[in-house]
Image (tube, helix red, strand yellow):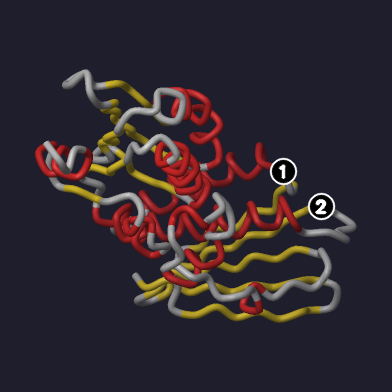
């Protein structure tokens, strides 16, 4: 079985930060390269904060995260019981837009797309399951 | 852990050094201070990112917001020497097109003061 990190936590910033610190230590203990650890932290932060800010309809307000170190890649699985949301359906981001015409938000999902090899989404019963693969 | 310090090299510019992690916690710790050093001063700004280990979209939004404020007063912001993974993330959203990434203070000065 590959090295795996797994936690369930409440959908709030305080609990997320505690988990993010544990993930950072998990990456260090498993000697992931700096760039890979950076991408894992980036994907986790963008997707979890997106759920904290925008997800509605959750009965439990709980999030499940699992990180598996598979050969050649890191797979991050994020589950919640909010209303169905497939981040792959988010509109394309125009990175050529001039600075003066930009807002300070709206870059997160594009960043996630840019550092992942693959994003898979499925609705499993009443839960969203997002699977994101990062090259290692 | 995040650290924002001012480096005094030149009275004409605001020279800052940002080190550590600009995640959601880091942003809350420095956002007001960063705006105070940059947007409120309305001076050309150089931000040394060589000690920056992590940045998410929240931190990038802070850069965009402050650079927009500076532009309204004809002042620019440049980013100095980000680590490769930070630079890659900044470029992934095209921040470098509006906030140039430079390799030296001299290069920064040429962008901040093009006529001098």
- Image quadrant assignment for residue B5: top left
Q: How many marks?
A: 2
Residue for badge 1: A12
Give residue A45's position: percent from left, percent from top: 55, 52
SS for tag 2?
Answer: loop
Question: What subunit carries mark 2?
Answer: A
> In the picture provided, is A40 more to the left or to the right than A54?
left
> In the picture provided, is B72 more to the left or to the right than A82?
left
Q: Are marks 1 and 2 on the same chain?
A: yes
Give residue B15's position: percent from left, percent from top: 26, 27
Cα–Cα gap, marks 1 and 2: 9 Å
SS for tag 1?
Answer: loop
Res. A1 in view: no
A128 to B97, vertically: above or below: below
Q: Label 2 near label 1: C-beta < 8 Å?
A: yes
Picture residue at 33% right of the left edge, 43% below the top: B53
Picture residue at 72% right of the left edge, 56% below the top: A63
Res. A99 in view: yes
Give A8 or A130, whichever is nearer the viewer: A130
A125 to B71, vertically: above or below: below
Picture residue at 74% right of the left edge, 47% below the top: A10
Give A65 or A113, whichever is nearer the viewer: A113
Q: Earlier in the sequence, mark 1 or mark 2?
A: 1
Give A119 or A8, whichever is nearer the viewer: A119
Picture residue at 70% right of the left edge, 66% below the top: A79
Question: What subunit carries mark 1?
Answer: A
B97 to B16, vertically: above or below: below
Residue for badge 2: A61
Give residue B33's position: percent from left, percent from top: 47, 23
Give residue A88's position: percent from left, percent from top: 62, 78
Q: Residue furthest front?
A: B115
Quick one: label 2, few (<14), some, or many (20+) residues within 10 Å? Answer: some
């Amino acid at each position: 079985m590959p090295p795996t990190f797994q936690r369930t936590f409440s959908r709030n910033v305080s609990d997320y930060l505690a988990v993010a610190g544990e993930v950072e230590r998990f990456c260090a203990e498993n000697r992931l390269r700096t760039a890979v650890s950076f991408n894992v932290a980036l994907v986790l932060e963008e997707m979890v904060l997106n759920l904290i800010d925008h997800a509605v309809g959750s009965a439990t307000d709980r999030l499940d995260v699992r990180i598996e170190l598979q050969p050649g890649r890191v797979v991050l699985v994020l589950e919640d019981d909010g209303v169905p949301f497939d981040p792959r359906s988010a509109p394309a981001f125009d990175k050529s837009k001039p600075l003066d015409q930009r807002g300070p938000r709206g870059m997160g999902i594009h960043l996630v797309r840019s550092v992942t090899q693959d994003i898979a989404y499925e609705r499993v019963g009443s839960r969203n399951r997002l699977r994101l693969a990062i090259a290692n | 852990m995040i650290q924002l310090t001012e480096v005094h090299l030149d009275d004409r510019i605001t020279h800052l050094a940002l080190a550590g992690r600009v995640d959601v916690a880091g942003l809350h710790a420095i956002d007001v201070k960063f705006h105070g050093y940059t947007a409120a001063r309305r001076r050309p700004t150089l931000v040394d990112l060589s000690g920056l280990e992590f940045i998410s979209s929240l931190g990038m939004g802070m850069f965009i917001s402050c650079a927009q404020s500076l532009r309204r007063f004809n002042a620019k912001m440049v980013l100095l020497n980000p680590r490769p993974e930070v630079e890659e993330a900044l470029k992934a959203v095209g921040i470098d097109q509006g906030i140039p990434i430079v390799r030296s203070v001299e290069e920064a000065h040429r962008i901040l003061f093009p006529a001098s």
